[in-house]
């Protein structure tokens, strides 16, 4: 299982950061690789699903269905791709903790297992892990900006 993880202090309360994580339609603001996100059924919560179109490798755009499989307000959410090209399993794990000063420590981990056996592991070493290593901090930065807009 591969994992890319980063942590960021956000000057907004855990409640405000949690609210941003619940606005799945705004995930397109997280980074230039996302093209569209559409909520499929109910608001964000355990079992909720959404569809995402994003650029996997330039210029390849893929569709995937995501479901929230762990939802512990306002501490933890896990979003699992039910269909992820090039991955047997792919999770986004969000963990929030108060910084004790009114802000939030937000940790984002992407955990995945490459598909295609040895070829998939090679592709992960050559390109996919580097892509995730760039995207995780970009996502945290975007969540920070959205939370600050909401807090203001």
Image (cartoon, grey):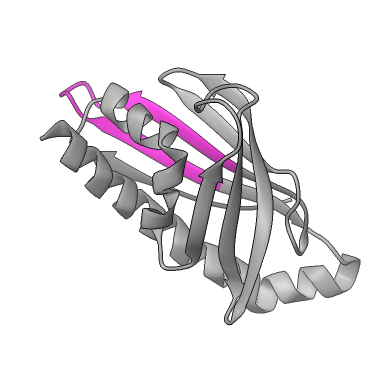
Q: Nearer the viewer, residue 86 or 1?
A: 86
Looking at this view, name the residue that lies furthest to the top: 73
Q: Residue at x 35, y 36 (%)?
A: 20
Asked if residue 44 is positioned above or below residue 2 in the image, the reply reads above
Looking at this view, name the residue that lies furthest to the right: 117
Residue 61 percent location from the top left of the image: 62, 71
Whether residue 32 sits left or right of residue 92 in the image: it is left
Q: Quadrant of residue 123?
A: bottom right
Image: magenta residue range:
92-109
Whether residue 95 sits left or right of residue 49 in the image: it is left
Q: Residue at x 87, y 67 (%)?
A: 116
Asked if residue 141 is positioned above or below residue 101 in the image, the reply reads below
Whether residue 39 sits left or right of residue 116 in the image: it is left
Q: Is residue 16 magenta?
A: no
Residue 9 percent location from the top left of the image: 26, 40
Q: Is residue 103 magenta?
A: yes
């Amino acid at each position: 299982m591969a994992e890319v993880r980063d942590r960021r202090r956000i000057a907004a309360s855990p409640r405000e950061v949690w609210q941003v994580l619940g606005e799945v339609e705004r995930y397109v603001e997280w980074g230039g690789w996302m093209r569209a996100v559409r909520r499929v059924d109910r608001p964000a919560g355990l079992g909720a699903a959404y569809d995402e179109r994003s650029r996997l490798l330039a210029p390849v755009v893929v569709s995937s269905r995501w479901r929230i499989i762990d939802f512990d307000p306002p501490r933890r959410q896990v979003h699992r791709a039910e269909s992820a090209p090039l991955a047997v399993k792919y999770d986004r794990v969000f963990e929030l903790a108060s910084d004790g000063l009114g802000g939030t420590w937000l940790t984002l981990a992407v955990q995945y297992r490459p598909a295609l056996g040895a070829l998939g592991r090679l592709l992960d070493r050559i390109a996919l892990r580097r892509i995730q290593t760039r995207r995780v901090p970009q996502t945290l930065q975007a969540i920070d900006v959205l939370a600050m807009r909401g807090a203001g």
